[in-house]
Every structure is written in structure tokens, then in C-alpha cells.
Image (cartoon, coloured by chain):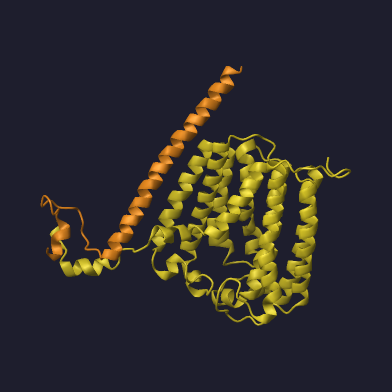
Chain colours: A yellow, B orange
Amino acid sequence: MDTIVTPSDHRAEGEAVSTASPRDYFDLMKPRVMTLVVFTAFAGLIAAPVDADPFLAFMSILCLAVGAGAAGALNMAYDADIDATMQRTRKRPIPRGVVSVANAYGFGVVASILSVLLMALASNYLAAGLLAFSIFFYAVIYTMILKRSTPQNIVIGGAAGAFPPMIGWVAVTGEISLDAVILFMIIFLWTPPHSWALALYKSGDYAAANVPMMPVAKGAKSTRLQILLYSVVLVIFAGAPVLTGLGGAVYGATSVGGGALFLLLAWRIFRSRAGEAGSAEEGALYAVRAGDKAARDLFAYSIGYLTVLFAALIVEHAFGAYVAIPGVSP
Amino acid sequence: MTQDNHLTSAREGQPTGESLKLTPEQEAARKKRNVVIAWSLVAFMVAVFAITVVRLSQNIAAGAGT
């Protein structure tokens, strides 16, 4: 019977009822990461040599966005303890106490299932399988296993973030081709310098949370060297689409110009003392001590670099700007 | 109005199924969540229907061409 609970009990229990708004659940999905996922997936889909049905293509991208968001929610549910410790993440919905861990898990699992099912319906089983695997890889392999156990966490775990353009490609072609693998590899190689640049100027945050990011586990000097090495490999590999014909003159010019600036910023980090103060930093994502400015600059630029690379592919394939490079393009 | 009014329907005096007295803020938040869940379910059903129609029409068109 309803009346077995007294009014005072109602108030006491009522205080435990969530005041989370839909916006809080949206924040669980890491909207900024989702934006990059949608953009790179769109580039993969547009660059594929197939005329896709616009509606089905749109639905595939939507499924990818929801799937990526679901993986983000599962990540936040598992990492609630870490997020509460770190300055950068303590205002997320779970540390703030507006969404419970159980609700975040429930939301993440339901959104994962629905996104994969809808992807299977809108595109093909291979794309749906890749989406399911990428969610599993991010939520389980990266978040639950790698993140707290090895400084190589984001090197291996970066594969999860590299899947979107490949899934976009597979959603319309139904197969994994060399070009799809190249798009995957560009993001895979981009992730370490991008993440370690952030980790350098937020190393105190990671140390406080006992997350063995590279600057915490191996030191700032080693991290700066590895950022430079990965940057060299990335910039060289980013030219691969030109060799296969996936990228034309616009992409080639963007790759060379953008890559040169990427290397310059990576070199500045290598020559700097970024990450050596090691204390926890207050403030926003881009707040930084003077000595860590080089790391902040590469972190911010790396996002722009990836965006411009994939934007070049979109411009070439969606707007007819593709011009083959004589003697280079096949 | 009494503290327990929320437990019974004001119109018919029937149990409402509620077991907690929520604050106005909690009730407003729950209503917002419910509305979004409802629209999400509707959107999911519409998406499944629309995808099915597009797929069927593609298959019919492909069959007609053979």
C-alpha cells in the first residue's frame, strides 16, 4: 500500500530522487568528442567511392554519434572516482551528484544497443559490428583495463577513436578497403601526441588520480620526445591518401602545410620544459602555466589539424574540388 | 491539500502508484526526462519505419532492374 510510507519518509526518500535534466544526460555523451566523431565519420562516408542514399547515410552518422556518446557515458560511469579527483572533470554530471553511476551505466548500455541495432538496419552488419566493437573497445578495453594500468593506455586505446571514419566508409561500401584503414591510421597516430600534449600540462591532475599517463609514469622529458617521434610518423603517414588517390591536390597541400606546423609545434614542445612543474592545475581545459604553453598550443592545434585534414577530403569529394596530382596520384 | 494528497488521484480518489513525495524541482526534472524519453522512443520508431521503407523501395527497384 502507498500509505505505509509516512510524509516525513517521503521527504527523506524524495531527496534521493534525481534532479538530472536531459542536458545532464547529453553531457554524459561527451558532446565535444561526439562532434569530432561525427565529422570524421562524415568525411569517411563522403570520401568512399559510392553514391550513398542521403537518408541512410544520415542515419548511419546519427547511429555513430549515439554509439560514441553511449561509450562516453559508460566511460564516465566507470571513471566516476577519477573524474571526482581531477580538476578538469570534476564538474561532469556524476561527480556533481546529479546522475548516479547506475543510471549512467543504464543509459550507456541502452544507447549502445539501440545505436548498433539501428546501424545494422540503416547500413550493413559489418558497420554495425565495427560500431559495437568500437564501443566495447573504448568502454572495456581502454576505460576498464588500459587506462589505469599502462602508460600506453591512449596509444592502444586510441584505436577506439580511430574507428569512426572507417565505420563511415564501411557503412556505405560494405567493405574495409585500404583507404578506410589509412583513415583509421591517421587518427590512431594522431591520438598520442594530442593526448600527451594535454597530459603534459595537466599531469598534476592525472598524478592526483593515479592514472599512469605518460608524463606521470615516464616523466615529462620522455613524453616530449615521444610526442615529437609520433608527430613525425603522423605527418609522414598523413600523406598516404595522396598516394592511393583518396586525397588530391587540396588534401595534399593541406597535409603538407598543416603537417609542417604540427612538426614545428612538436619541436617547440621537445625543446621546452613543458610538464616539469607537475602540480595540479586549476581552471579550464586550455588554462596553462607559462612553461607549459608549448604543450597547450600543440593540444589546441592538433584538433584543428585533424579537422582541416578531414575537411579537405570532404571538400574534394563532396564539392568536386578533387584534382589529381600529376606523377603522384595513381 | 494534505501531505499525502500525491498518493491518491485528486479527481477520483484512486491510488496514483506514487510512493515518494517529490520536491517541485525533482518533479520538474522527472517530467523533462520523461518527455525526452517519450520523444526518443517515437523518434526511434519513426527511424525504423523510415529506414525499412527506404530499404524496401531500394530492393524493389533493384529487383525491377533484373
Q: Is B21 located above or below residue A254 in the figure?
A: below
Residue B9 point in image, percent of width and height: 15, 53
Residue A66 point in image, percent of width and height: 50, 50
Q: Residue furthest right?
A: A327
**Residue drawn 75% across and 69% down?**
A265
Q: Quadrant of residue A48?
A: top right
**Residue drawn 73% across and 67% down?**
A227
* Residue A161 left/right relative to A5: right
Closer to the camera, A146 or B7?
Answer: B7
Q: Quadrant of residue A138?
A: bottom right
| Residue A276 seen anywhere in this rendered image of the structure | no
Q: In this figure, what is the number of numbered marks?
A: 0
Q: Quadrant of residue A155?
A: bottom right
* Residue A142 left/right relative to A244: left
In the rendered image, which quarter contains the C terminus of chain A?
A: top right
**Residue drawn 38% across and 51% down?**
B36
| Residue A257 seen anywhere in this rendered image of the structure | yes
In the rendered image, which quarter contains the N terminus of chain A?
A: bottom left
Residue B19 point in image, percent of width and height: 20, 59
Residue A301 point in image, percent of width and height: 69, 65
Closer to the camera, A4 or A259?
Answer: A259
**Residue drawn 47% across and 70% down?**
A91
Q: Is A192 located above or below residue A49 in the figure?
A: below
Q: Residue furthest left?
A: B13
